[in-house]
Image (spheres, rainbow, N blue to C red):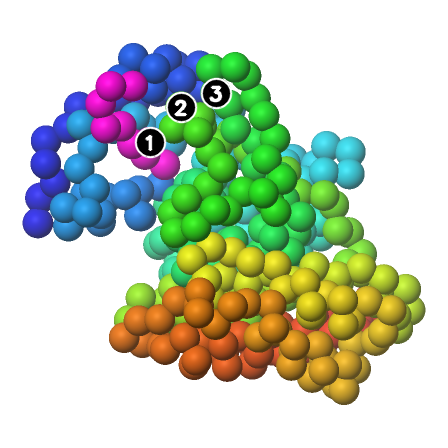
Amino acid sequence: MFPDEFDYYEAGTVDEALDLLAEHSDAETELLAGGHSLLPAMKSGLSSPDVLIDVSGIDALHGVTVEGDTLVVGAMTSYSDLLDTDVVHEHAPAFAAAVGQVGDEQVRNRGTVGGNLAHADPASDLPGAALASDATVVAAGPDGEREIPIDDYFFGMYATALDPEEIVTRVEIPSAAGAAGAYAKKPSPSSGYAMVGVAVLVEMDGDTVTSVRVGANGVLDHGVRLDAVEEALVGGSLDRESIEAAAAVAPDCVDEMMVMADLQASAEFRVNLLEAYTKRALAATAENAAPQAAD
């Protein structure tokens, strides 16, 4: 299928993109990043923008740096470029683990971190990892930049705290150097998207868990923190018994009436998957933490 006709603009700077958004505020306008979500939607007729503003070539939105105790990821940084940056694995292990399971190599070469979080597909891999990593989404708009804590960012299916006239410029992640992280998902057999995905980030003092964040995607219509799992782990260990006990309370973190259901998985099955993949993610985190403990 072919998309409907549209006007195309290529922005060279963030200010230019914002000016274009303001200029075409009375039209249906979309921002183009990697295009993996938008272009199929346009071809299928699910999205039919009048104006397309390409922000993928804005140099200021590319790259990964460490600024003090914060990992800064430009919004247009591709998944592949992020994975090729050593400091990402050191400072954001849970986030890196999730990015490594996005699509295939071709998708990772083109898809972008900012585009993923702006689109907010509940079955994508980054919402849970962003929650586990305590990320902050930074957006630019007519009134300047503002920071949106990830716990306040996801509202629902493809819905975020972003205003229509705002552009994601970067993602900031507090350094978790020395922490252990992992991501486990049950991929859809048809698309590879997460039927359920769970990301974990744990800090330990010896054998004791001192801090933990657990995020999930693919379960509700938005990413969700698994607070009860976190509470069950803090102050304990990551041994098999503790992991099983913590995973067992994962279903308590969601209202089954709100759990997504489709042809591939009923709500009941997704809740069962949530417990199983929480256990897998915690077990993988424990394995990743073991070498650090040995050091």
Q: Would you identify the image quadrant in which residue 89 lies? A: bottom right
Residue 274 coordinates in the image, percent (x, y):
53, 75
Q: Nearer the viewer, residue 84 or 281?
A: 281
| Proximity of marks 2 and 3: CB atoms separated by less than 8 Å | yes
Residue interval drawn in magenta: 25-33
- The residue indicated by pointer 2 is 165
Q: Would you identify the image quadrant in which residue 207 lies? A: bottom right
The residues tagged by marks 1 and 2 sit, at their Cα atoms, a distance apart of 10 Å
Q: Would you identify the image quadrant in which residue 98 lies? A: bottom right
Q: Secondary structure at mark 1?
A: strand
Q: Which dot, 3 or 1, sits closer to the camera?
A: 3
**Residue 113 higher or lower than 146, as above or below:** below
Q: Residue at x 85, y 74 (%)?
A: 236
Residue 9 coordinates in the image, percent (x, y):
26, 21
| Proximity of marks 3 and 1: CB atoms separated by less than 8 Å | no
Q: Residues within 10 Å of mark 2 (few under 14, many from 20)?
A: some
- The residue indicated by pointer 3 is 141
Q: Residues within 10 Å of mark 1 (few under 14, many from 20)?
A: many
- The residue indicated by pointer 1 is 31
- Within the magenta stretch, is there residue 31? yes
